[in-house]
Image: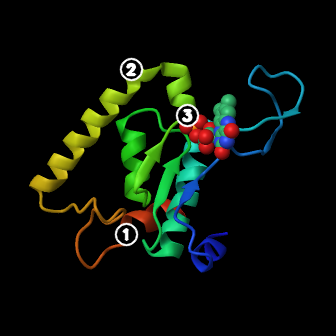
Amino acid sequence: MVATALTRRIDGLIVSNTNGRRLRRSPRGTAAKAAALSGRPLFEPSTRLLARAYLLTGGAMPLIGCGGVEDSETALAKIEAGANLVQLYTGLALKGYGIVEPILVGLSRALKRAGSTGSANWSAPGRASGAGSETTEADAYATSD
Ligand SMILES: Cc1cc2nc3c(=O)[nH]c(=O)nc-3n(C[C@H](O)[C@H](O)[C@H](O)COP(=O)(O)O)c2cc1C
């Protein structure tokens, strides 16, 4: 999909949508049923996928990190994995608009912290580790279990 998006010069990709994986048990332990996964359970797999997309595109295409974003830590993780923008749906639906400001405040603090150590360049996502190690953060997310 990334190769096609690059070839067709797609403006950007949202990584990712809900996961249609079949659950063995519903959250209440009742009968198995097909369910689209969103929110917290989607955070890790979608962040891994985002990091892989970033490594494949080499930063050549805007990526929107989505899946399980619910606070500044999860938003920051998306940026570190390669997102230019962050999208949230379930977090907003469950916690309301009030979660937006703390996310922005937390990101702003993290940016200031990173800036004061001279290590961050958030205009180039996934490159918070400094020159010569551009893919380190995305690599870590892409390969984590
Ligand atoms: C109730 C619901 C409806 C959604 N409708 C759409 C939709 O119409 N089109 C779409 O591309 N994604 C849709 N999504 C996917 C979300 O935009 C998002 O990609 C996904 O839920 C993962 O992010 P989240 O964990 O923040 O919810 C929907 C998700 C939910 C939970």
Residue 47: image x %, image y %? 52, 53
Label 2's element? Answer: helix
- Nearer to us in this view, 141 or 66: 66
Neighbours of disc 2 within 10 Å: few (<14), some (14-19), many (20+): few
Q: Please tell me in which quadrant of the rendered image residue 25 appears.
A: top right
Q: Is residue 111 left or right of residue 98?
A: left
Do labels 1 and 3 touch, CB within 8 Å? no
Residue 106: image x %, image y %? 27, 36
Q: Please tell me in which quadrant of the rendered image residue 20 appears.
A: top right
In the rendered view, would you say 107 is above or below 121?
A: above
- The residue that appears at 39% across and 72% down in the rendered structure is 135
Look at the image and tell me whether residue 41 can be seen: no
Pointer 2: what residue? 98
- The residue that appears at 12% across and 61% down in the rendered structure is 118
Whichever of callouts 3 and 2 sits on the residue coming sooner in the sequence is 3
- Nearer to us in this view, 100 or 112: 100
Q: Amino acid at mark 2?
A: Gly
Whichever of callouts 1 and 3 sits on the residue coming sooner in the sequence is 3
Look at the image and tell me whether residue 117 can be seen: yes
Q: Within 8 Å: ligand 1 and the Cβ of disc 3? A: yes
Locate the N terminus by quadrant.
bottom right
Pointer 3: what residue? 89
Residue mark closest to the camera, 2 vs 1: 2
